[in-house]
Structure formats: structure tokens, C-alpha cells
């Protein structure tokens, strides 16, 4: 282990710095978090650089108490501005702003790019890291020190405000040592979160092993393991090691320290993917399928494991976690949310099959990905050893990344489901649509394809509360009717999309614009205020219906016999009303966003198209849902078996 230490001068040798200016600046981060900072500049700093101090939250009270929370954050243009995942700087900056706002203190933004070696040299070091050097050896190879940062100016800034003792938000022991040597008491070292991504795991391991950063990664540096991208772990939480599959994709271990992720951890993983999904949304539409990197990120975050039983490598989480994860992903890209939701659901469907099938498809490593389609139903005829199936099936979402297909077929008036290897089917490029373009929902075709008996099941048995898998796995959700999850994805994606649209609308209204030399905001217009309130109200209504649906969905997890008719009716009705309110919110936002929102580069036009397609899905057909829901609520019984 290499320790970085600096011999800092004693406090008496530092000249006094003075406050040069103060200005109030409202801050808003890409994830929507907002706070207000009093930004201070200084004269007399020893290095002559333009460092900033952001006073956040109740900083005066914290200063009087003798323990303001302080973060010394070195500038990182690639991470702070462009969202680079090669480091953890951007997430640490965002975390520090919120934590310091909550407790009161100072965020020192220090102009020391690349550990003090400068932006160009840092990028040169990145190139060397791509050849195998770690972050420290790359700096040395360029003729720099491992870490050239000096915190004398930071000490001067704190002294100028009378902060002689602080609580330091850091995982870096060198920062605390330098401040102490410079006369600033460090009463407590407060660890930051661990912000893991597939791109920065080696970087974080180097910081831990070379310079004693207090990072509990639980990763052996020489094990070739890569953590789930976008994972944000609280201080002290261990990140379970991930295995690298032969494909090079990341397959996380099914459990973290002997357990799977909690509901909150799983939703946080989905949220961490949102910025990347937004960045990739145009490419996703252009490809008419999910980019390979997106699928790898979903896999690495464990999205496909959410519903699968623990015995096959899943997390065994419930309907609420699943629904919230899909909703969260839709705040980045509706096509991704739709596709990921169905792929996760289809893993759960495979766990309902008999053991012979499960032994075949769950062979370790990544979860088996399968597309499923029943439109239109194909034909099956009994032959020795199995069934010969024929047909052309449409809307096979993300068949481009699947290994299996679950196909609906009819035999002597009985609906069956056939599990078929994708290699045995013809793939037809038929997905040319105006919305949900990135789902890759192409057609499949087979003619007299032999499917062995063990891979053909009666749909009624497979989709009911007593499937073969329910006699294998103890997980409560395996007893739920399959329709519970089949009906959840479209309204979840619609709600997440509406929430994204409202976020974009808010940003647009609050953005200052110059007109005739004056700075104006749309938000200052009473008409814009009223329109935003109307859109926000519709999103709130959609959220309330969504919450009611998730509450109703909990009942099948508690009862092996499934929900009563009234519960089923309330569930489907709430989902339909949530999706309908989501679409109305998006329309309201578009109507108030001007002509620029219809440019193809603007995400709002894509959101409108995606939600339009979602509302045309059979699971959200409002008229038949209203009819059947009314029958169920009145106790008249359903006339549609699939409701």
C-alpha cells in the first residue's frame, strides 16, 4: 500500500485571506435536487487560484456550534459537468450538496483538476489507464506526483470565516491530515457514500489500496470483478462482488452479504441508470432496440433479477419493488422501462415452469432473457415426443437480446404456451412505429417446429396460482396470478414518463431568458403558473391511482387463492386511471411547451409518442377495463377470463 502524505506548513505560516464577494446562487442538479448556496470568493489565497466556498443550509448555526460539515471537493470537469463514470466525483459533489444543506456547513470547490495535474494531463492519464496502469501509476508515468493537491487555500478560506474546527466529509485520510497540519481541527471524519459503477470500480479499488481511502468495496482487486453500475451505497454498506460472464457482460452475485437488495436499494439502482438512459434515448430510437450497453447496465444493476426466486439466483422482491423500478426507469426512457419490465417479468414466468425447464434455462450467470407474445395465437398439433407449432407472432419485445421465446399456441381449443429457443425461429424486422420505437418488438415465425413435451404447458395452469413453479419455490409472489404483473408494465411506464415530462416543463419555465435586454422567465407568467399547476395536479392524480393499484396488488402475494373479484377490479381500474391521468399530464405539458418541444431532438415529443403507444396497449384499453371493473365491483363476475 502506498500512502500519500504532504508536509503542510503550520498555521502560523499561512497569510490571512479575506472574503472578496458573496452572491446567492440557486442550484439544481440533473436528478432534480435543488438547494441554494451563498457563494463566496476570496483574495489573498496562497496559490492565486479562483477557489469557491459554497455556504449551505444553516451554516451560521453550525459555525457557532463549532462543527460545520465541510467537503473539500477538487474540481473534475469530466465528472462534475459531463457525468463521467470513470470516477465518483460527480455523485460525490451531488451527495455533498444535499448532506451539507441538511446539516449546515461549507462545500469548498477547489480548482485542482486531476489531483492537481490539470485537465489535459488527467486525460493523458486516462489513456494510460486504458493500457493497464492504475490512476496513481499513470500520474507517475507522466512525470507528476501521485497526488499534487495542496489544501492550504482551503484552510485559508475556512479561517477567513472563523471555522477553526470542522466535521470533514471525506473518505481520504490525506485531506484530514493536511487540514490538521494547517491548524484546522477535524473533530470528526464523516465518510461519503460509495458510488460504484462498472467504469470506476478499478479506480475506487486503487484509491482504497494505494492511498488508504476508507472505501468498503468488498472487491478483491485481482479478482476481475466489476460492481453494478450506478450503485450508490450508504457509508459502511458493502457491495457484493460481481462475476464477469463469458460474454463480458456483468452479472452481479444474487445476494449482497448473504442477502438480496432491499426495496429501497433496488429502486436506487434503477434511479442511478436514469441519466444514462436519457443520454442513450436517441440512439435507442434510431436502433429500434435497446443498445447493448443499456442491456448490460440493466443486467449489472440486477433489474432482471427483481422477481426471480432466490433459488435460481434472483432477489425474490415483490410487486411494489418491480412496479417502482419500471416507473423509475421510465423517467429516463420509456422504451427501456417497457423492455426491462417485461424481461424481468418473463424471468419470473420461467420460474413457474416445471423443474426440468428450470434446470435447462437457469444455468447460472446472467438471468435467462425471453420474449413473450400471444398476438396472434399460433397453431399446435400433437406429434410423437411433443408438438409441431406454426405461426407468425408479433410484438415480441426485445427479442433482439433474448435467448428464448414464450409463444402462445392453440391445440384442440386449449391455449398452450411453448418455450422455444430463439435459434429455432425466424426473426422478421417488423417494428416500425412512432412510439416505443426502442423496444425492438419484432415478429417471430415458425413452421412445423418441433417443441418437446416438457417445454409446452397449459396456459391456465401456468398462469394461475398453482403453477408447477409454485410447488418448487417458497417465494409468495410465485403464487400470484400472472396477470398481476402482465398488467403492470404499461401504466408504470406511462407514469414515469409523465413525471419526466413534468420535470422538463418545470426546468423550461424556470430557465431565465434574455428578451429586449431584460432577463425573463416563463414561470413569472400567471398563465404558465396555472398550466404547470394543472399538469402537476394530473401527475399527482396518476400517482395516487398508482399507489392504490400497488396496494391492491399486495393481496395476491398474501393469498394462495388469489385476489377476490373486487380486489382485481380495483387493481385494474386504478392502473387504467393512473395511465389515463399520465397521458393527460403529458398533453398539458406539450400544449404549454411551445413549438420547440416538437423538434425531434427534444425529449418531450418522444415522451408524447411513447405514452400514446402505451395507452393503446390492450392492458390499458379503457372501455373494456371500465366494463369489467364495474362488473367486479358490483359483484356480477367477469365475462373476460383474462381480466
Image: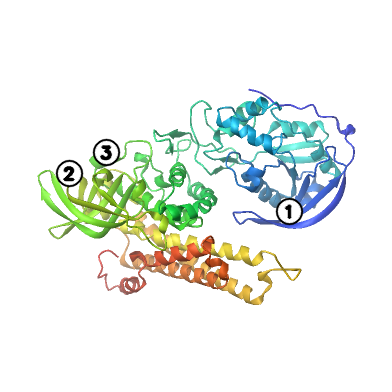
Foreground tag (1 vs 2): 2
Check the image and report above or below for 231 versus 593.
Answer: above
Determine which quarter of the picture holds residue 75.
Answer: top right
The answer to the question of whether label 3 and label 2 lie on touching residues, with beta carbons closer than 8 A, is no
Whether residue 481 is visible here, answered yes or no, is no
- In what quadrant of the picture does the N terminus appear? top right
Q: Which mark is residue 452?
A: 2
- Residue beneath label 1, please? 57
Q: Residue at left 90%, top 33%?
A: 12
Check the image and report above or below for 370 versus 516.
Answer: above
Measured in 3D between alpha carbons, the distance from the residue under mark 3 to the one under mark 2, in whole angstroms, is: 13 Å
Mark 3 element type: helix
- In what quadrant of the picture does the C terminus appear? bottom left
Q: Give the mark, 3 or 2, whose residue is nearer the N terminus.
A: 3
- Residue beneath label 3, please? 360
At label 2, counting other C-alpha atoms closer than 10 Å, the crowd grade (few under 14, some 14-19, many 20 or more) is: some
Measured in 3D between alpha carbons, the distance from the residue under mark 3 to the one under mark 1, in whole angstroms, is: 56 Å
Nearer to me, 297 or 98: 297
Whether residue 241 is visible here, answered yes or no, is yes
Nearer to me, 477 or 623: 623
Q: Residue at left 44%, top 60%?
A: 492
Amino acid at each position: 500500500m502506498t500512502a500519500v502524505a504532504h508536509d503542510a506548513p503550520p498555521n502560523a505560516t499561512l497569510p490571512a485571506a479575506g472574503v472578496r464577494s458573496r452572491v446567492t446562487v440557486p442550484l439544481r442538479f440533473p436528478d432534480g435536487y435543488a438547494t441554494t448556496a451563498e457563494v463566496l470568493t476570496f483574495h489573498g489565497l496562497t496559490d492565486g487560484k479562483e477557489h469557491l466556498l459554497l455556504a449551505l443550509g444553516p451554516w451560521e448555526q453550525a459555525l457557532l456550534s463549532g462543527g460545520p460539515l465541510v467537503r473539500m471537493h477538487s474540481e473534475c470537469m469530466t465528472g462534475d459537468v459531463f457525468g463521467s463514470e470513470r470516477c465518483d466525483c460527480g455523485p460525490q459533489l451531488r451527495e455533498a450538496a444535499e448532506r451539507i444543506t441538511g446539516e449546515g456547513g461549507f462545500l469548498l470547490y477547489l480548482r485542482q483538476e486531476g489531483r492537481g495535474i490539470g485537465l489535459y494531463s488527467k486525460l493523458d492519464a486516462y489513456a494510460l489507464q486504458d493500457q493497464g496502469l492504475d490512476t496513481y501509476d499513470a500520474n507517475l508515468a507522466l512525470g507528476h506526483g501521485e497526488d499534487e493537491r495542496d489544501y492550504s487555500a482551503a484552510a485559508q478560506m475556512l479561517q477567513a470565516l472563523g471555522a477553526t474546527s470542522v466535521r470533514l466529509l471525506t473518505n481520504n485520510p490525506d485531506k484530514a491530515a493536511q487540514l490538521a497540519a494547517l491548524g484546522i481541527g477535524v473533530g470528526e471524519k464523516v465518510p461519503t457514500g460509495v458510488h460504484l459503477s462498472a467504469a470506476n470500480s478499478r479506480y475506487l479499488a486503487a484509491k482504497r489500496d494505494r492511498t488508504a481511502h476508507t472505501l468498503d468495496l468488498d472487491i478483491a482487486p485481482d479478482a476481475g470483478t466489476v460492481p453494478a453500475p450506478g450503485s450508490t451505497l450508504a457509508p459502511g454498506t458493502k457491495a457484493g462482488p460481481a462475476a464477469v460472464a463469458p460474454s463480458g457482460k456483468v452479472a452481479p452475485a444474487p445476494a449482497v452479504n448473504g442477502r438480496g437488495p432491499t426495496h429501497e436499494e433496488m429502486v436506487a439502482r434503477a434511479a442511478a441508470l436514469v441519466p444514462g438512459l436519457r443520454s442513450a434515448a436517441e440512439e435507442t430510437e434510431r436502433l429500434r432496440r435497446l443498445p447493448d450497453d443499456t442491456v448490460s447496465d440493466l443486467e449489472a444493476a440486477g433489474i432482471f433479477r427483481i422477481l426471480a426466486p432466490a433459488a435460481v439466483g434472483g432477489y425474490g422482491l415483490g410487486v411494489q419493488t418491480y412496479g417502482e423500478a419500471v416507473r423509475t426507469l421510465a423517467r429516463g426512457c420509456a422504451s427501456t422501462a417497457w423492455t426491462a419490465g417485461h424481461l424481468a417479468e418473463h424471468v419470473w414466468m420461467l420460474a413457474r415452469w416445471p423443474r426440468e425447464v428450470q434446470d435447462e434455462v437457469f444455468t447460472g450467470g446472467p438471468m435467462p432473457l425471453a420474449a413473450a407474445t400471444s398476438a396472434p395465437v399460433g397453431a399446435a398439433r400433437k406429434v410423437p415426443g411433443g408438438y409441431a407449432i406454426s405461426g407468425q407472432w408479433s410484438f415480441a419485445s426485445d427479442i433482439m437480446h433474448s435467448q428464448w421465446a414464450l409463444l402462445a399456441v392453440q391445440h384442440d381449443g386449449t391455449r398452450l404456451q411453448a418455450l422455444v429457443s430463439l435459434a429455432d425461429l425466424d426473426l422478421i424486422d417488423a417494428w416500425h412505429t412512432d412510439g416505443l420505437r426502442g423496444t425492438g418488438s419484432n415478429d417471430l415465425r415458425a413452421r412445423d417446429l418441433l417443441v418437446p413435451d416438457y417445454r409446452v404447458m397449459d396456459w391456465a395452469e401456468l398462469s394461475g396460482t398453482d403453477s408447477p413453479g409454485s410447488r418448487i419455490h417458497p417465494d409468495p409472489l410465485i403464487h400470484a396470478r400472472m396477470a398481476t404483473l402482465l398488467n403492470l408494465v404499461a401504466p408504470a411506464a406511462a407514469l414515469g414518463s409523465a413525471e419526466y415530462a413534468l420535470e422538463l416543463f418545470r426546468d423550461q419555465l424556470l430557465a431565465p431568458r434574455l428578451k429586449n435586454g431584460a432577463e425573463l422567465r416563463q414561470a413569472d407568467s400567471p398563465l404558465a403558473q396555472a398550466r404547470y399547476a394543472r399538469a402537476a395536479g394530473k401527475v399527482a392524480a396518476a400517482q395516487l391511482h398508482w399507489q392504490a393499484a400497488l396496494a391492491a396488488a399486495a393481496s395476491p402475494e398474501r393469498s394462495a387463492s388469489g385476489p377476490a373479484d373486487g380486489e382485481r377490479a380495483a387493481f385494474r381500474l386504478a392502473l387504467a386511471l393512473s395511465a389515463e391521468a399520465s397521458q393527460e399530464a403529458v398533453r398539458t405539458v406539450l400544449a404549454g411547451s411551445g413549438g420547440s418541444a416538437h423538434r425531434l431532438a427534444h425529449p418531450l415529443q418522444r415522451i408524447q409518442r411513447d405514452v400514446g403507444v402505451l395507452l393503446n396497449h390492450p392492458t390499458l384499453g379503457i372501455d373494456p377495463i371500465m366494463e369489467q371493473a364495474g362488473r367486479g365491483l358490483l359483484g356480477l363476475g367477469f365475462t373476460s377470463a383474462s381480466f
